[in-house]
Image (cartoon, rainbow, N blue to C red):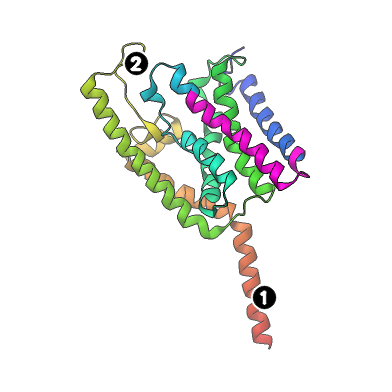
Amino acid sequence: MLWGSFGAVHLISLLAAVGMMIGIYFILKNKTEKVQRITLFLLSLSGIAAIVFNLLKWDSPIEYLPFHMCSITAMLLPLAILIKSRALSNLLLLWLLGAVFALVMNTQQAGYELLSDTFAFYFFPHVFEAGIPVLMFKLKLWKKDYHAIPTTIGLTFVIYTAVHFINELLNRYVAINHIVDYAGNPIFLNYMYSQKPVVPFLELLWKIVPHEYFYLLLALPIIALYLSIIYLPEIVSVLRKKHKAKKALLAA
């Protein structure tokens, strides 16, 4: 059975992914912090396994280097679970959207067989990359901190910029050495999609700014809005406390 894209099987798989993470939450809810961290750390290693799988499976490792957002998330997630880093944990609160996007907009993977290794190494790592950060915050192993918004946006911008220049260098290397894919077609590397859009949403941004690298910078205001909504309860709570403190001071 094929996975498909926005068909019944695809939609059921998305519901199953949500159900899986809810189930893991209730299983871990009353466990010790040590058990919670170890369990989520082991599950997070599926992303590393997927990177290795793709490097070996497709016989074209240069096309599967870990420079996409989800691959970088896969490498950062186990580290973030093990150490207490405000910057990393809050960064992944944004970057989990990459995994959600990959699961929902699965057009290129629609032909995967449900019981195949290609499906397993795509579906489960992305589910965990999307769900584990949510579980870490829900289990209070990480703490949301709106002060991290500038750091999150800054790190995203820096990493995106670095990956863009990696694309430029690799594409020059590919062109000079005439490297082709399994079908004999010239390889064009587009990690983090800095070179050109590949889905309708990105194509919309491209229509506004039809230039590689710069077109995706239009997403920064959207990112800022998303983070503002995510951190809104914490921001409101702080403002209320300040307001109460000011009223108490004036009353005195």
Q: Secondary structure at mark 2?
A: loop
Q: Is residue 220 left or right of residue 135?
A: left
Q: What is the distance, in whole Å, between disc 2 and disc 1 at their CAs?
A: 64 Å
- 34, 246: nearer the viewer: 34
Farthest residue toward the left?
176
Q: Position of residue 13 (x, y in %)?
A: 65, 25
Residue for badge 1: 244
Q: Amino acid at mark 1?
A: Lys
Kindly indicate the quadrant of the structure image that contains residue 183: top left
Q: Does the magenta portion include 6?
A: no
Kindly indicate the quadrant of the structure image that contains residue 30: top right
Task: Find the magenta span and give its range.
Answer: 27-52
Q: Is residue 191 left or right of residue 139?
A: left
Q: Dot 1: few (<14), some (14–19), or many (≥20) neighbours within 10 Å?
A: few
What's the residue at 65%, 50% (across, down)? 141
Vertical comparison of 55 with 204: above or below? above
Residue for badge 2: 181
Q: Amino acid at mark 2?
A: Asp
Q: Does the magenta portion include 30?
A: yes
Residue 25 visible in the current orientation:
yes
Farthest residue toward the right?
30
What's the residue at 64%, 48% (across, down)? 137
Residue 212 visible in the current orientation:
no
Vertical comparison of 76 with 190: above or below? below
Q: Position of residue 248 (x, y in %)?
A: 68, 82
Quarter that holds the N terminus: top right
What's the residue at 62%, 51% (across, down)? 142
| Of the two numbered discs 2 and 1 in the rendering, the one whose residue sits closer to the viewer | 2
Q: Position of residue 56 (x, y in %)?
A: 45, 19
Q: Give the mark nearer the N terminus: 2 vs 1.
A: 2
Q: Is residue 105 left or right of residue 252?
A: left
Kindly indicate the quadrant of the structure image that contains residue 198: top left
